[in-house]
Amino acid sequence: MPKAAILTALEQPLEIHDVDLDKPHAGEVKVRMGASGVCHSDLSVQNGTLMGVAPIVLGHEGAGVVEEVGEGVTSVKPGDHVVISWVPQCGECYFCQRGQGELCKAADASLASGGLLDGTPRFSWNGAPLSQMAASGTFSEVSVIPESGAVKIPDDVDMKVAALIGCGVLTGVGAALNTADIKKGDTVAVVGCGGVGLNVIQGARIAGAGEIIAIDMNETKLQMAKEFGATATINASQGDPVSQVMGMTEERGADVAFEVIGLGPTIDQTITMTRRGGQAILVGVPRMDVMVNIPAFFGIVLQEKTIKGCWYGSSNVQQDVPKLIDLYKKGELKLDELISREISLDQVNEAFDAMKTGEVARSVIVYPS
Ligand SMILES: [Zn+2]
Ligand SMILES: [Zn+2]
């Protein structure tokens, strides 16, 4: 019986309980978790910004070791180390066939249902089905996930680092390398310097950006942004960030601007600080009632701006996970530095509190091996 952190109802602290876990069905694998990051999206399910079917095992940013495989599984075997992809990419649907696996049709169903690809979870608790967030549920010592959600990695990669790749790193670095088209020497602005924002910054650095302007209201995060590659910082609590970006770019605006918070006003600011002909990339997950308020003619058409959403860093996980591990091993990608705290599963609520105060890059749950 694995121990898991369960959200029983909206706005409630997570509860740690022993849960039942079914064997992997055909096309599924059982993974013993090595580590799980505590991501803002977990908090978003707790507070209702993101949909979740309670009771639910949260956690979607994990890595572990395959313990058992279901019928027909060929890509991984027991003993393999894997990063968990919370968008299991089927490889066969309309989107996967067109190189947009992050939009996989099969994955959509599991996001909405709280189950795996067939809509049912493998966890149960007190005899009733227990949902698993994003076909993952990494706040559990053991979980069963779709085969396509288990991405094999070399055995020598630290589990904590591997876990972070599964969400924050794929999303942030992917936003810069995949979703956006950053040209050498471009001026990039990043609004929001939390765990994902820092990864956008290092992705922009790897893409060859000339100037990277980090924008946040938290001075500690701005200092970290510099370590990850920001060449200038703006503390948005001290004056309008849009006019400051204009001032730094001969009143043109940034070639590429990223929004990594998910708030209406910062989304509008990000689009506004993008130069004529530039790209505004929306990465942060807003509440469902948030609208974009930009004048269609003067703000978009005349400006020829591209406004592009970004889901899971437009990642092809089978290609991008090994690529990111490579960059990490070469020292180009900072991953250890993203971890601000290592905790045990029963400290998960403290990690949520830390996120609410905006102080940490990432708390990572380390499971006993
Ligand atoms: Zn996440
Ligand atoms: Zn697909």
Image (cartoon, rainbow, N blue to C red):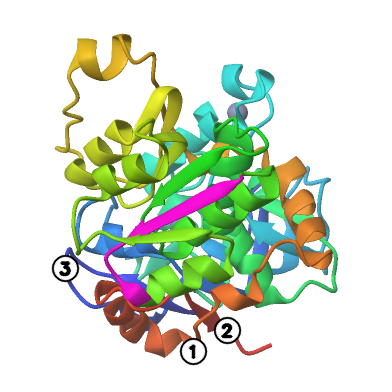
Residue 87 occupies quadrant:
top right
Residue type pointed to by label 2? Val
Q: CA distance from mark 1 to mark 2?
A: 6 Å
Q: CA distance from mark 2 to mark 3?
A: 24 Å
> Looking at mark 1, is its residue's CB closer than 8 Å to ligand 1?
no
Indicate the position of residue 224 as horizontal and vertical percent values: 49, 73
Residue that badge 1 annotates: 344
Residue that badge 2 annotates: 366
Residue type pointed to by label 1? Ser
Taken as a whole, is the magenta stretch helix, strand or loop? strand
Indicate the position of residue 159 as horizontal and vertical percent values: 69, 75
Secondary structure, mark 1, is: loop
Residue that badge 3 annotates: 11
- Quadrant, the C terminus: bottom right
Residues drawn in magenta: 210-219
Secondary structure, mark 2, is: strand
The answer to if 341 sits in the magenta stretch is no
